[in-house]
Amino acid sequence: MAKGTNPAGSIIASVLITLIISGAGMYFGLPLLFPNMNHEFVEPSDLDEYAQVSELEDDGIVVQSRYMESKENAFITDNDLTPTKMPGTEMNFTTQGSTKLAVSFEATILFHMSSDFSISTKYNMTLSINGVQNKSTRLSYYSSSPLGDTTEFVENVHIEFESGTLPAGTYTINVYWYSLLDASFGTTQLVAATSSYQYPRSIYVQELKV
């Protein structure tokens, strides 16, 4: 031991140096070993909300969205040749402007043919942003001879499209349907819902930044 050295002071100095070195190693080393330890901790119950917020912050595309579902009674026959609004499918949507709308329609539709149906039947369904844009699909059935029995089957319908850039305002979204061929004289029906048939139909709209 050097002459004039205080043993207690040496011990304290050694301890302080050790603590400083250890602390620096933990501060700089642990993040390398555990890279997530500096991230905000998220409870499992918050994961859905966290993912949604993060997604919106990352791309900022969706301004707002709305979903509507209906089981209101609705049907037409092959005699209905004039386009009419399908009950339960009207939505008013107000935009902030310089945005576009992504719209979609989903439904399970029942075809009903009476026993004396023959030849063909054809229907049109149109998803529309009224006064702006629309898109249609057709449902049809053909038989070369009378069916002999009442026949029913379901069709899954999906229509979607995106509009161009729109100014701020309130837009009405509807679904229109009608028969294209009155060759069956009321022997067919297109059914969205009745008191005994309750498949839902829905409209989903998103306002998107351009």
Image (cartoon, rainbow, N blue to C red):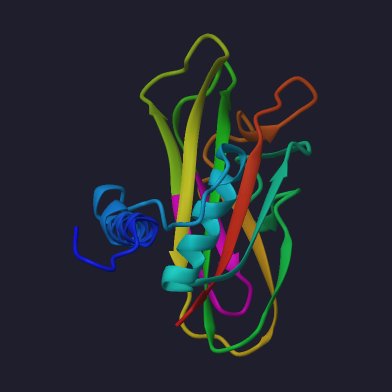
Please state which of residues 191 and 23 is positioned toward the viewer in this rendering: 23
Give residue 38's position: percent from left, percent from top: 42, 58
What residue appears at the point 45 percent right and 83 percent down from the top-left corner? 210
Give residue 33's position: percent from left, percent from top: 25, 48
Give residue 93's position: percent from left, percent from top: 70, 70
Left or right of 65 in this view: 142: left
Does any portion of residue 35 appear in the rendered image? yes
What residue appears at the point 63 percent right and 73 percent down from the top-left corner? 130
Numbered circles on residues, count? 0
| Magenta-tinted stretch | 123-137
Please state which of residues 127 and 56 is positioned toward the viewer in this rendering: 56
Give residue 165's position: percent from left, percent from top: 49, 85
What residue appears at the point 49 percent right and 70 percent down from the top-left corner? 57
Q: Quadrant of the N terminus?
A: bottom left
Left or right of 68 in this view: 5: left
Does any portion of residue 125 appear in the rendered image? no
What residue appears at the point 34 percent right and 54 percent down from the top-left corner? 11
Q: Main secondary structure of the magenta part?
A: strand
